[in-house]
């Protein structure tokens, strides 16, 4: 038997808030909106690769995980999965509760004694239902790992790329020369649909990973006919569910995790519906803390079915699968100087019309830094690049073009293994614009925390360094 004979196990767990955990405020982005019920089940999925030498864990959630530090500690102590061989990412759905705060090492009362700073100032105390939800997500994460390990079986692996046309650049140029959130078919958009496929000895699907550059925000800020907001796995959850159900119809029970690629400035094609007037004025999409009813939910399901069918075609196209798979990992943690954009805050967040480019400028933040975790995983001949935060599509496309190995898969919204309690961490946003976006003040510029937009330069250097470590281990 080969030294690297692959086994794969997978599990899916429900992390929908229980009725007692509602209502939830999603974040400042909601305004006064509250989630009062769940539209559909929200899921967390675990996929474990075991080649007899190392185990690698992909943990993908449609919401928060509860407490990643303790989850990783559990995986190490019980299953010998080291922190560098774990990738946790979320699908970046704003339609799920994002405040899943829980720490087994303390109490809610103790946690609230210290005021924590957020992007827009002091954060509100953690509420009991938020604490309970965090504990629930934590417990479900542990259960998913347990089940994935228990489900390990001999497997073969293959990967392929296709195309899916459900995204578009959201850097829209307005008549006044200013950029705002919207749609722009002339700006770059990556249509690449990447899939990883794991099958058992009979050829039945054990697990799949889908990767695509688009925000999972179709149901974001939508209120129903009664004025209530619904927690929802959104576009990512709909796509994963569609593909899993399609395989179930084929008689194959599988777990399919959807991951977001370099999609920080990529929106679903049918996502924004601004109102424009002949005099050049405009009104932002009424979904912003207003009402569009079930229309956006139906559009989300429609777009998900389109990509779901695209994904099924790509999965079915994979004919070359290997059972002996080497897994190599390299990690880096960048420390970059921080910047703050003045004259940008909550008013501009709630209404793009409040943005005034002539008053926005960057100022240095002395002794504060932005930390970006990176992980490069080589699964057989496939490179997977994990990136903390959100990545502009232009950066992602250039990284893929420059990578020493082809078919680079970029997984964003990744959370690294290192301790995140750093005294010099800048409490800013995680939109890292490229030089063009920085100079043209695209919508993400106001939330760019890295000085002089040097993120791409430093990330590219780190990526090459990690490839050298993996491809030339003896140098």
Image: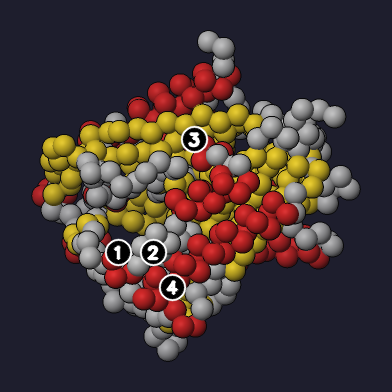
Circle 1 sits in a helix, a strand or a loop, which is it?
helix
Q: Pointer 1: what residue?
A: 111
400 is higher (above) or lower (below) than 465: below
Q: Position of residue 232 (x, y in %)?
A: 51, 71
- The first of marks 1 and 3 along the sequence is 1
353 is higher (above) or lower (below) than 339: below
Crowd band around label 3 with a 10 angstrom C-alpha radius: few (<14), some (14–19), many (20+): many
Q: Pointer 4: what residue?
A: 132
Judge by depth and name the residue closer to the eye, 252 or 267.
Answer: 252
Q: CA distance from mark 2 to mark 4?
A: 8 Å
Q: Pointer 2: what residue?
A: 101
Residue positioned 32% across, 39% down in the render = 371
Q: Are marks 1 and 3 in contact (CB under 8 Å)?
A: no
Of badges 4 and 1, the one in the foreground is 1
Circle 4 sits in a helix, a strand or a loop, which is it?
helix
Of badges 1 and 3, the one in the foreground is 1
- The first of marks 4 and 1 along the sequence is 1
Q: Are marks 3 and 2 in contact (CB under 8 Å)?
A: no
251 is higher (above) or lower (below) than 334: below
Judge by depth and name the residue closer to the eye, 39 or 436.
Answer: 39
Q: Are marks 1 and 2 in contact (CB under 8 Å)?
A: yes
Would residue 137 be visible to someone looking at this image? yes
Residue reaching furthest right?
202
Q: CA distance from mark 1 to mark 2?
A: 10 Å
Q: CA distance from mark 3 to mark 2?
A: 25 Å
Crowd band around label 1 with a 10 angstrom C-alpha radius: few (<14), some (14–19), many (20+): some
Q: Position of residue 451 (x, y in %)?
A: 22, 35
């Amino acid at each position: 038997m080969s030294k690297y004979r692959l086994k794969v196990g997978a599990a899916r767990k429900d992390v929908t808030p229980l009725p007692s955990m509602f209502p939830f405020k999603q974040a400042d982005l909601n305004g006064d909106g509250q989630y009062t019920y769940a539209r559909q089940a929200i899921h967390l999925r675990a996929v474990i690769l075991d080649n007899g030498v190392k185990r690698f864990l992909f943990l993908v959630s449609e919401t928060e995980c509860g407490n990643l530090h303790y989850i990783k500690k559990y995986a190490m102590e019980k299953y010998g999965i080291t922190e560098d061989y774990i990738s946790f990412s979320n699908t970046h759905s704003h339609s799920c509760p994002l405040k899943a705060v829980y720490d087994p090492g303390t109490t809610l009362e103790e946690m609230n004694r210290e005021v924590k700073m957020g992007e827009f100032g002091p954060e509100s105390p953690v509420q009991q239902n938020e604490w309970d939800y965090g504990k629930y997500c934590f417990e479900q994460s542990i259960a998913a790992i347990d089940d994935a390990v228990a489900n390990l079986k001999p497997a073969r692996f293959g990967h392929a790329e296709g195309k899916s046309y459900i995204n578009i650049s959201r850097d829209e140029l307005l008549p006044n020369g200013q950029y705002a959130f919207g749609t722009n078919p002339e700006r770059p958009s990556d249509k690449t649909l990447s899939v990883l496929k794991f099958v058992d000895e009979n050829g039945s699907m054990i697990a799949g990973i889908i990767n695509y550059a688009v925000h999972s925000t179709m149901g974001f800020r939508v209120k129903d006919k009664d004025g209530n907001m619904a927690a929802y796995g959104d576009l990512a959850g709909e796509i994963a569910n569609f593909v899993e159900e399609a395989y179930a119809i084929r008689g194959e029970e599988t777990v399919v995790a959807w991951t977001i690629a370099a999609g920080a400035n990529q929106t679903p094609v049918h996502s924004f519906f601004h109102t424009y007037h002949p005099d050049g004025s405009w009104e932002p999409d009424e979904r912003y803390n207003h009402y569009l009813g079930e229309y956006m939910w139906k559009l989300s399901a429609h777009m998900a079915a389109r990509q779901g069918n695209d994904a099924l075609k790509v999965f079915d196209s994979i004919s070359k699968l290997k059972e002996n798979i080497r897994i190599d990992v390299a990690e880096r943690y960048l420390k970059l100087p921080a910047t703050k954009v003045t004259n940008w805050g909550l008013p501009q967040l709630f209404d793009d019309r409040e943005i005034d480019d002539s008053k926005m400028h960057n100022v240095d933040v002395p002794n504060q830094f932005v930390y970006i975790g990176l992980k490069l995983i080589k699964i057989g001949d496939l490179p997977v690049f994990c990136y903390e935060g959100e990545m502009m599509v232009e950066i992602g496309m250039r990284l893929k073009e420059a990578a020493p190995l082809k078919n680079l898969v970029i997984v964003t919204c990744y959370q690294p293994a290192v301790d995140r309690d750093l005294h010099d961490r800048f409490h800013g946003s995680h939109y890292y614009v490229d030089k063009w976006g920085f100079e043209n003040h695209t919508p993400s510029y106001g939330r760019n925390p890295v000085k002089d937009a040097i993120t791409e330069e430093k990330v590219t250097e780190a990526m090459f360094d990690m490839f050298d470590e993996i491809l030339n281990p003896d140098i």
